[in-house]
Amino acid sequence: MMKRMFDSTTRRASTHRASSISAGPDLLRHRAAVVRWALAHGHPVNRDSLAAIINSASLPTPGQVGLHWTAQSVNTLLIQGCSNWCTAHGVRYPDNLSHTLTTYLRYLGAYRLLDADSDPMIALKRSVAEFDKDHREQLNQRLAKESTRGSAKSRHPTAQLQFLAPVLPLH
C-alpha cells in the first residue's frame, strides 16, 4: 500500500475505533448529548477533545462516565490524563482541549450531573483558566527564546504572540 504525503500518521480521537469499542454505547450517547447541548447553547466544543476528555476521565471504570470532578482532577486531566490516553491509543492530541473541558463542565453543571463531593463549578473553571494562563506563558517564553535568535526587529513586543485574557462568568 502506498503512503501519501498528506496522510496523517495518527488518527483523530473521535474516530478512533478502539475508543468507540471500549467506550460502549453509554459513553457514545453521552458524548453526542454533550455536543448537541453545546451547539444548542452556543458553547465551543471540539469532538476530538471531548472524546479524549470523556475517555480519559472514564478510564478507572471503563464504559461509565466520571462524574466526580475536583480542581486537582481537572489539573491532572489537562496536564497528563488526556496526553497519556492519546499516546496509549495512538491518536493525535486535540486542539482547544481546555475550551471543550469548560463546555463539558458547564454541561455537567447544567444537568446537575456532578457528584455531591465535587468542587464548586467556579473552582473547576478557575483551574482550567489557570492551566490556560500557564500554557500561554510557556508558549510566550518559548517564542521569545526563538525570536531572540533572529534579528533585532523580531525582539519588538508586537512580534510576540499575544493572547486574550480568559473570561470567567460570575454565575
Image: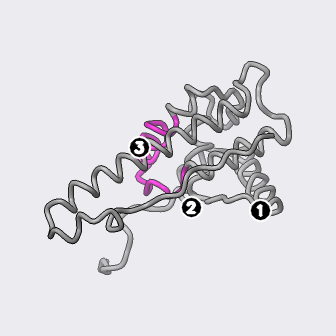
Which badge, 1 or 3, comes first in the chain's sequence?
A: 1
The dominant secondary structure in magenta is helix
**Residues in magenta?**
77-97
* Residue 119 inside the magenta-drawn segment: no
For label 2, the residue is 15
Question: Would you call the spot at circle 1 few (<14 residues within 10 Å), some (14-19), or many (20 or more)?
Answer: few
> Measured along the vertical axis of the image, is residue 156 above or below residue 20?
below
**Element under label 3?**
helix
For label 1, the residue is 42
Q: Looking at the image, do the residues carrying marks 1 and 3 touch, with CB atoms under 8 Å apart? A: no
Where's residue 123, x and y in %? 66, 30
Residue pushed farthest top?
A: 117
Q: Residue at x 55, y 25 (%)?
A: 72
For label 3, the residue is 88
Q: Based on the displayed image, in which of its 4 quarters is residue 158 positioned?
A: bottom left
Residue 71 circle label: none
